[in-house]
Image (cartoon, rainbow, N blue to C red):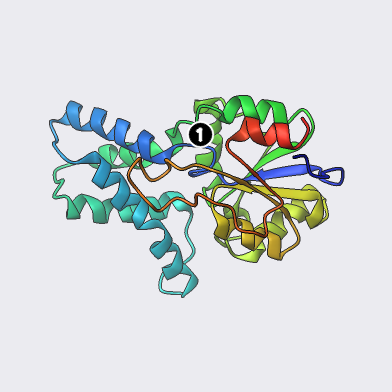
Amino acid sequence: MKIDVSSVKALTFDVFGTVVDWRTSLIEEGMQFGKSKGIKVDWAKFADAWRGGYAPAMDRVRRGELPWMKIDALHRMILDQSLNEFNLVGLSEAEKDHLNRVWHRLKPWPDAISGLERLRKRFIVSTLSNGNISLLVNMAKNAGLPWDCILSAELVKHYKPDQEVYQMAAELLDLQPDQIMMVAAHNGDLKAAKSVGFKTAFVRRPLEFGPSADKADLMPDPSVDVSADDFNDLADKLGV
């Protein structure tokens, strides 16, 4: 089914989990790192713990318990905690920094690049991520992601799903909110975008948290405008 998208000028994308497969990327790099350093650890559990600290850390910033900081800094704070938790000791500062920058090197889902290439023939395609700008730029260069624009929560010093992030995107793209469609695999992100007037597209990523996990949103919230199985399916449904 095609929906009326005649007024939509831009698609803004959640990145972690929607565009890139953070979990598999972390596990694969962790295994390579561990092999090179002679470190034995359950990298799947390590990846889950590292990502699991993300939302609580952002909430600490929202409550004023921590100052605002870019996601690289939050990731490093959680990494240091995870290294202690998993008893990984003796890493140099350079090794910790390299490990922390794995988030700059995440690999896209198989459909991401081809789907984005199709979608950008008709729409502006932009990130709208909590990831900081340097992270998103490095990720795009490393993975070949064909963004027209890099927008980050860093620009407004709020994290999604704070409304300020979506309002910033509309302002910087010089568009009305209903001329933008937020694309994400997470209903919370989409509901927040909808609350400021964005159109919304849900894309299923059932393996985001692993094959046996039940954390992924498998069904769209009833409020979304369109749902798709991947980016190419989304392009089909948007008539591209």
- Seen at 45% across and 50% down, the residue is 216
Q: Is residue 213 left or right of residue 166?
A: left
Q: Is residue 136 visible?
A: yes
Residue 190: percent from left, percent from top: 62, 56
Q: Nearer the viewer, residue 129 or 109?
A: 109
The image quadrant that residue 38 belongs to is top left
Residue with the mark numbered 1: 139
Q: Is residue 99 left or right of residue 36?
A: right
| Residue farthest along the right direction in this orientation | 6
Q: Nearer the viewer, residue 216 or 151?
A: 216
Residue 87: percent from left, percent from top: 13, 50
* Secondary element at tag 1: helix
Q: Is residue 216 left or right of residue 124?
A: left
Q: Is residue 232 left or right of residue 40?
A: right
- Seen at 54% across and 38% down, the residue is 19
Image quarter (top left, top right, bottom left or bottom right) of the N terminus: top right
Residue 206: percent from left, percent from top: 46, 43
Picture layout, residue 174 above or below residue 67: above
Q: Nearer the viewer, residue 31 or 155?
A: 31
Q: Amino acid at mark 1?
A: Met
Picture layout, residue 240 above or below residue 154: above
Image quarter (top left, top right, bottom left or bottom right) of the C terminus: top right
- Seen at 72% across and 51% down, the residue is 225
Picture layout, residue 194 above or below residue 104: below
Residue 184: percent from left, percent from top: 59, 48
